[in-house]
Amino acid sequence: MNAIVGTALKLGDDIDTDAIIPARYLTSMDTSSLTEHVMENFDPTFKMRLRENRIIVAGRNFGCGSSREHAPLVLKAAGVQAIVAENFARIFFRNSINIGLFAVEAPNASSSFNEGDRVRIDIDRLEVRNLTRGIRISIKEFSEPVLSILKAGGLVRYLKAKGEW
C-alpha cells in the first residue's frame, strides 16, 4: 500500500461527533450539503484550514459522543485524507474504517505535529512521520480484516470485491 502524504490540520482532545457535524443538520445523508456545516460550531476556521491541510492530527478520544456515522462521512467528503490521533472513540474508529477513511492511532501524535507540518502515514511500516520536524511515531497495527477493508476503500467495496454484496 502506498503511503498517505499531506499536511497537518491540528485539533485537540475530545473532539466529539456533534462538534464534527451538529445534530440539527442530520436530517439528510447528502454529504455535499452536510460539508457546509462541518465543525461550524467548534471551529469556524476549519473549512478554510482544511483547504491546505488534509490530514487531521488530534489528541485523545477523537470522535467521542454519539455513534452517528455522519461524522466520518462528512470529514471524508470535506476532503480529509486521514486522521492521526492518540486514540479514537471505538464506534467512530469503526465507522471510519467502514467508509474507507484512514483512522490511525499514534501515541504522542498531538505533541509531535504543528499545524501545517508535512505528514507521511505508512501503514506497511506501521509509522507516521513528521517530515517537517524529522519525527517518527509507531502506529497501532491494524488487524488483517480491517486492513483489507481499508485497502479496498471501505466495507461496501470490500464486500463487492469478494462477491458478497
Image (cartoon, rainbow, N blue to C red):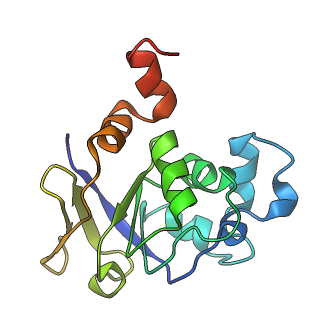
Is any atom of residue 94 visible in this view?
Answer: yes
**Percent of width and height locating residue 81:** 42, 52
* Residue 56, picture quadrant: bottom left
Q: Quadrant of the N terminus?
A: top left
Q: Residue at x 67, y 70 (%)?
A: 65
Q: Residue at x 70, y 55 (%)?
A: 68
* Residue 161, picture quadrant: top left
Q: Residue at x 33, y 38 (%)?
A: 145
Nearer the observer, 115 or 21? 21
Nearer the observer, 50 or 155? 155
**Percent of width and height locating residue 157:** 45, 25
Is 112 situated left or right of 61 in this image?
A: left
Is any atom of residue 79 visible in this view?
Answer: no
Taking the view exactly as shown, the residue that stands out farthest to the top is 163
**Percent of width and height locating residue 10:** 44, 77
**Percent of width and height locating residue 121:** 24, 58
Is 22 situated left or right of 59 in this image?
A: right
Is 92 situated left or right of 103 in this image?
A: right
Q: Residue at x 82, y 52 (%)?
A: 26
